[in-house]
Amino acid sequence: MADDEVMGAAPDEAARSASGLVAGREPDEEGRRLWLQARAAATNAYAPYSGLRVGAALSTAGGATFSGVNVENAAYPAGLCAERAALAGAVAAGALGAGQRLTAVAVARVDDGPIGPCGLCLQALAEFGDPDIIVAVSAGADAAGAPAVLRVVALHELLRAPFRLGAHTAHDTHVVDERHDAHDTTDTPDTADAHVPAPDEGERP
């Protein structure tokens, strides 16, 4: 769900979160089908407060796919993003866990407008690998019923340094490192080795 996909936010504002994906590559047929699955799921989203209905669909290395929708709540922090709803379904079904990875995640609005995952969802997805992120970056359908412009980027291009607790994550860190090297040669912080200050260290507010 996009950063602006909070209850009460105007749907048009959600387009901002997808602006960084315009330079991504075009998805293959499998990626387009996954996006269409996400858009179909979006029709069932529960969004009475913002009116922004979002669906997500993810695929695993084992070939399984799972869908989820955003579920809003009168107590705003109790709402759930579509991406994490799909992720919970995959874990509950036993399709994700130790050594099992995500390969792709598609996010769609019911009105086909641009939208992308928020930072919280990116962190949640990064627990299970470095999947491709598939989103629409402009509205308007083509002959197949999909938006004219879909783009794909790897998760690490959107979240450069996800939080890690050493090696205690379910995804294969070597795969993430290899994909990072293939896309970018610049140095990025290694958060696994980063020093975490004690509560009494660092500057006081």
Image (cartoon, rainbow, N blue to C red):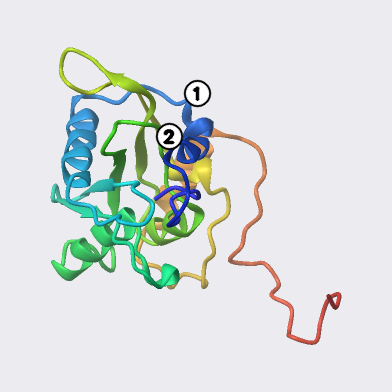
Q: Could you say which disc has been placed on residue 153 in the image? A: 2
Q: Position of residue 108 (x, y in %)?
A: 30, 39
Q: Dot 2: within a 10 Å radius of its alpha carbon, few (fewer than 14), some, or many (20 or more) residues? A: many
Regarding residue 98, the answer to whether it shows in the image is yes
Where disc 2 sits, the SS reads strand
Judge whether 42 appears above or below 129 on screen.
above
Cβ atoms at labels 2 and 1 below 8 Å apart: yes
Taking the image as shown, residue 184 lies to the left or right of residue 65, namely right
Q: Position of residue 136 (x, y in %)?
A: 35, 29
Q: CA distance from mark 2 to mark 1?
A: 8 Å
Task: List the residue tagged with mark 1.
Answer: 23
Q: Position of residue 133 (x, y in %)?
A: 37, 40
Q: Could you say which disc has been placed on residue 135 in the image? A: none
The residue that appears at 46% across and 36% down in the rendered structure is 12
Q: Residue type at mark 2: give it.
A: Val
The residue that appears at 57% across and 34% down in the rendered structure is 184
As drawn, which residue projects farthest toward the bottom?
200
Judge whether 112 appears above or below 67 on screen.
above
Taking the image as shown, residue 79 lies to the left or right of residue 33, namely right
Quarter holding residue 40: top left
Taking the image as shown, residue 165 lies to the left or right of residue 103, namely right
Judge whether 146 appears above or below 135 on screen.
above
The residue that appears at 17% across and 70% down in the rendered structure is 92
Where disc 1 sits, the SS reads loop
